[in-house]
Image (cartoon, helix red, strand yellow):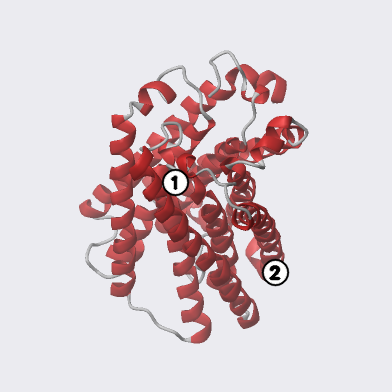
Amino acid sequence: MLAPDIRPAEKYSPLYFLASLGAGGLTVTFFMYLMFWVPHPGRPVPIFEDMQTVLMGDTLSLQIAVVVAMLGIAIFAFMNVKSLFWNMKALSGFRKTEAYAKLRTSNGETTLLAAPLAMAMTVNALFILGLVFVPGLWLIVEFLFPAAMVAFLAIGVWALRLIGDFLGRVLTKGGLFDVTAHNSFAQLLPAFALAMVAVGLAAPAAMSTMSAVVGISLVLSTFFGFAAILYTVVASVTAFNSMLHYGTAREAGPTLMVIVPILTVLGIMFLRQEHGLHTTFDVHTSAGETMVFLARLLTVQMLFLMLGTLVLLRQRYFDDFVFGSAISPGSYALVCPGVAISVMLHFFVNKGLVASGLIAKFDIIYWSLTGIAVFAQLLMIALVIRLNTQHFAQAEEEFA
């Protein structure tokens, strides 16, 4: 834990990559406005020309929503990239320290997976920026998909190498993994990184019209997606056993809710794969099946949100690490569940309830449920502002 007068730069942790991740996640929450509110006939996602059509002549309320979304995307994508560059620079210096050498021989070695996790999110955020702000991008998008898959595959290989270093160390010799310090879901960070790579690799499956690209996208995203699922199951079971014995590590308390973003990311991966199977390989899934699938994911997410919130409140985590003066880089893990539940609610409402005909788009029930997603988004924006001020305000001039 950093004392209030010690800047992050003076005691760096790879967990600060989560600051970049959170900003990238908020970029996605603003894209949900455009994804589900702006008409984009003939395309799976909205593009610059769709926003242009709305701004040139549509209802005032939708025009305001588009402007807000575009501003939000621009602001948080900038924060995402800026934080990523700061972290890469800080990590480079951190690698030369004794603290880094010690980290590589401890349970905390897996915190290095925050780097490929944040990098994969940045690639997603940059793609959103292109869709929203670059005219004519859709005309050349087929050329971009192979490049995007290469980028995500490179990040995936990076993540696998870090995981291999860790597992190779702890599984070949006994006594190198501290079970007493495994009393949180911190070890699920590698699974989160693999899931983020998987959802990026699945994007061409949902958007490409070339069967070869769709097929490669389906296979590669399946590999990383199921690797993430397997790692999640193993790490969560062993961690829960340790938590029952030793209680939950207080500073790592927010990791109890990391299941929430993992499920959102994997859920989107499966939806993208489903779309690609439908459009390219004539495999059909009904709207009702999609609704139940999303409802199941949302149920698990809500249960882990309740569990995590319960533990954090009992440990008075918010009093010290959010509203108090105590500083822990793990606090940024609080942003991910809120962002993830906001995005999942948008998908559940639109791809589940509306698509199945249970509710009408833009009716009072629609806006009541969507309002919960928007509230979660606004809450996370406030949290990011608070954490950035708490952690980086004193160091801003040096690392701007």
Toward the front, the furthest residue is 174
- Asked whether, in this view, residue 300 is left or right of residue 149, the answer is left
Give the number of callouts. 2
Residue at (33, 44) in percent of width and height: 244
Location of residue 282 in the rendering, given as x and y in whole percent from the top left corner: 47, 86
- Tell me the number on the disc at residue 146: 2
Outermost residue toward the right in this view: 96
Residue beneath disc 1:
185
Dividing the picture into quadrants, the one containing residue 284 is bottom left
Structural crowding at the residue carrying mark 2, measured as other residues with C-alpha within 10 Å and reported as few (<14), some (14–19) or many (≥20) = some
Location of residue 294 with respect to 386 vertically, above or below? below
Report helix, strand or loop for mark 2.
helix
Q: Position of residue 194 (x, y in %)?
A: 56, 58
Residue name at image x 29 percent, y 50 percent: 302
Q: Quadrant of the C terminus?
A: top right
Q: Nearer the viewer, residue 173 or 68?
A: 173
Secondary structure, mark 1, is loop
Residue 250, picture quadrant: top left
Relative to 79, residue 258 above or below: below
